[in-house]
Image: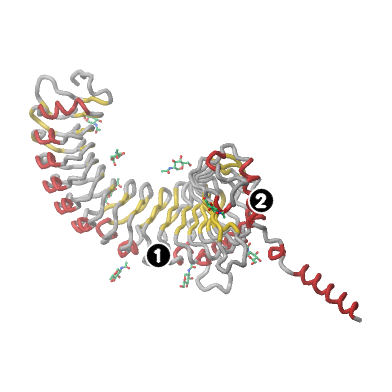
């Protein structure tokens, strides 16, 4: 009787053991986790930076390895994090026994020379929160099984040579906040599954990845129009698309959540600049160059207290430069090479953080404001190929950081001001194709010794030896053109 009961209990226990999730039973010990790492280390071509990885110490003391330390003292230590960025690691990832590392929460191996395939077995890291393999040499597809790493919040495979399509199961990664797949060779369209909501989901689609804050798919070969569903991801702070990945219209609600800081849409985009950008006061960096965007810049741009970088060049933008642009107090770089008309507002002199200003190849008229003398951080100024008239303001002599000055192909006249000779860092000066007259100030001639480019050709300059065009070897005298 007792034996019968015993047998029954034994059977029940066995059955229970069989039914229990395997992971609970074969939780790897710290020792076996360490052995898995040493085995991988043996396959690396340059493991010098992993000297501390040896059997004489606990894996918890190894470079880049972090363990949890049980508070009660009862549980066991396990490895929770491996972080080896920029350690010169070269070799494959295949030999790493991921099944021993199920306790990992973070795996950061960015900026190394690891290559080959990202093994499908990586999906055994089922508790992983962050995986960063940025800037290695992986050449495989994205493992389909990664769709089961359901706690993952940060995933970056950017700057590798990954091929194939984005696997549909990635849409199951609903905790994902940052997805960086840029600078790879990924192909195909964004999978329907990534775009369409499960029926129960409220806002649908990429809306399924509604926690996304960072999305980078730049520099791939992804085709098709930008998923309109991106509109419904309201927490986006970082969006980087383009250069052969997607085309079409800029999503009109791109800043709906009021969080967008970094926006890059490069090449292949068309249509109007979305109106919502006007109220998108969070913007810090905007790169919309080389698209076919249309619209009047004076109406589409608003007040951006944090904006430091804006490049709208090579679009089909029109309109005038609003004096209100002077309220962009943090602007360090502004490039609008387009179809802009009107004058350069004198208020631009208030943009005292400007380092790089490119207003070239527009239809700008009027004079260069004297207020430019206040832009003392300016090192690169391009106003070439416009219809500017008048003289070069003597105040340019105050631009002590100016290295590159291009005023070519305008209707500027008068003498070239002596004060330009005060711009001691000037190394590229293009004043060609204007109506400058008189002689070249001696001070500038002296500066020319240090210059990379010196071009005053196609003017009405007089004098015996006019340095006309000198590119490259500046010390060598040039013949008169
Ligand atoms: C880690 O190393 C320190 C000394 O460097 C030692 O005191 C400590 O016991 C080591 N811990 C483990 C878990 O090996
Ligand atoms: C998402 O996960 C569920 C199970 O949780 C699975 O049935 C489904 O196939 C997965 N979706 C995709 C697109 O892989
Ligand atoms: C976006 O969300 C709104 C509701 O907030 C919904 O009506 C609309 O269909 C969604 N659009 C897309 C493209 O998912
Ligand atoms: C665009 O992608 C090509 C490769 O397809 C690359 O060579 C080029 O540098 C990229 N352009 C930019 C601006 O990133
Ligand atoms: C921008 O904000 C103002 C004031 O809050 C509002 O009146 C206007 O409609 C908004 N414009 C857009 C395009 O959202
Ligand atoms: C510039 O804009 C004007 C007025 O909108 C238009 O007539 C002209 O064709 C545009 N030129 C270019 C080069 O886009
Ligand atoms: C200066 O500005 C011009 C025009 O935008 C650009 O082509 C060039 O690369 C810039 N040079 C440097 C050194 O920033
Ligand atoms: C400058 O003017 C000359 C003569 O008119 C012309 O051949 C040349 O293309 C012009 N250069 C530029 C950069 O506009």
Measuring from the top left, give residue 343's x and y in whole percent: 17, 50
Question: Does 205 appear above or below 134?
Answer: below
Which is closer to the viewer, label 1 or label 2? Answer: 2
Q: Is residue 77 visible?
A: yes
Disc number placed over residue 253 in the picture, else none:
1
Q: Is residue 222 visible?
A: no
**Residue topped by disc 2:** 97
Residue 429 found in image quarter: top left
Q: Quadrant of the C terminus?
A: top left
Measuring from the top left, give residue 363's x and y in whole percent: 22, 45
Between 193 and 434, the one lying in front of the other is 193
Work out how far the residue at label 1 is from the one at label 2, CA to CA, in angstroms: 44 Å
Residue 91 found in image quarter: top right
C-beta proximity under 8 Å, tags 1 and 2: no
Question: Does 326 appear above or below 418?
Answer: below
Count of number-bearing discs: 2
Residue occupying the far right of the picture: 1
Element class at badge 2: loop
């Amino acid at each position: 009787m007792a034996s019968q009961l015993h047998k029954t209990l034994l059977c029940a226990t066995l059955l229970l053991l069989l039914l229990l999730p395997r992971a609970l039973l074969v939780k790897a010990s710290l020792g076996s986790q360490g052995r898995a790492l040493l085995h991988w280390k043996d396959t690396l071509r340059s493991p010098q930076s992993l000297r501390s990885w040896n059997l004489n110490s606990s894996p918890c003391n190894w470079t880049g390895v972090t363990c949890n330390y049980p508070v009660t003292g009862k549980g066991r230590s396990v490895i929770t994090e491996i972080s080896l960025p920029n350690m010169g690691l070269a070799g494959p990832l295949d030999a790493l026994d991921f099944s021993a590392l199920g306790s990992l929460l973070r795996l950061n191996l960015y900026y190394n020379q690891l290559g080959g395939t990202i093994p499908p077995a990586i999906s055994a890291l089922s508790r992983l929160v962050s995986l960063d393999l940025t800037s290695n040499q992986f050449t495989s597809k994205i493992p389909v099984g990664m769709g089961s790493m359901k706690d993952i919040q940060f995933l970056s495979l950017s700057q590798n040579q990954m091929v194939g399509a984005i696997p549909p199961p990635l849409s199951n990664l609903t905790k994902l906040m940052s997805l960086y797949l840029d600078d790879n060779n990924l192909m195909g369209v964004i999978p329907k599954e990534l775009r369409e909501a499960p029926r129960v989901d409220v806002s649908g689609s990429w809306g399924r990845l509604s926690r996304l804050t960072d999305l980078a798919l730049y520099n791939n070969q992804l085709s098709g129009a930008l998923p309109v569903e991106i509109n419904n991801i309201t927490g986006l702070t970082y969006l980087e698309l383009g250069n052969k990945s997607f085309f079409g219209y800029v999503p009109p609600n791109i800043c709906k959540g009021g969080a967008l800081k970094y926006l890059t849409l490069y090449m292949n985009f068309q249509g109007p600049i979305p109106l919502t950008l006007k109220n998108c006061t969070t913007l810090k960096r905007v790169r919309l160059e080389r698209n076919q965007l249309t619209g009047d810049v004076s109406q589409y741009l608003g007040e951006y207290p944090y904006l430091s970088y804006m490049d709208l060049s090579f679009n089909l933008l029109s309109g005038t430069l609003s004096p209100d642009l002077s309220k962009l107090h943090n602007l360090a770089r502004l490039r609008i090479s387009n179809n802009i008309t009107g004058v350069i507002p004198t208020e631009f002199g208030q943009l005292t953080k400007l380092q790089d200003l490119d207003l070239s190849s527009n239809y700008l008229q009027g004079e260069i404001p004297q207020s430019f003398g206040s832009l003392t951080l300016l090192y690169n100024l391009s106003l070439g190929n416009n219809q500017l008239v008048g003289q070069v303001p003597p105040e340019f002599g105050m631009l002590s950081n100016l290295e590159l000055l291009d005023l070519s192909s305008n209707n500027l006249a008068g003498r070239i001001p002596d004060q330009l000779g005060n711009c001691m860092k000037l190394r590229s000066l293009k004043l060609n194709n204007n109506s400058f007259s008189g002689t070249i100030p001696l001070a500038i001639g002296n500066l020319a010794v240090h210059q990379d480019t010196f071009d005053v050709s196609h003017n009405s300059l007089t004098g015996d030896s006019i340095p006309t065009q000198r590119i490259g070897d500046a010390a060598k005298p040039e013949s008169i053109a």
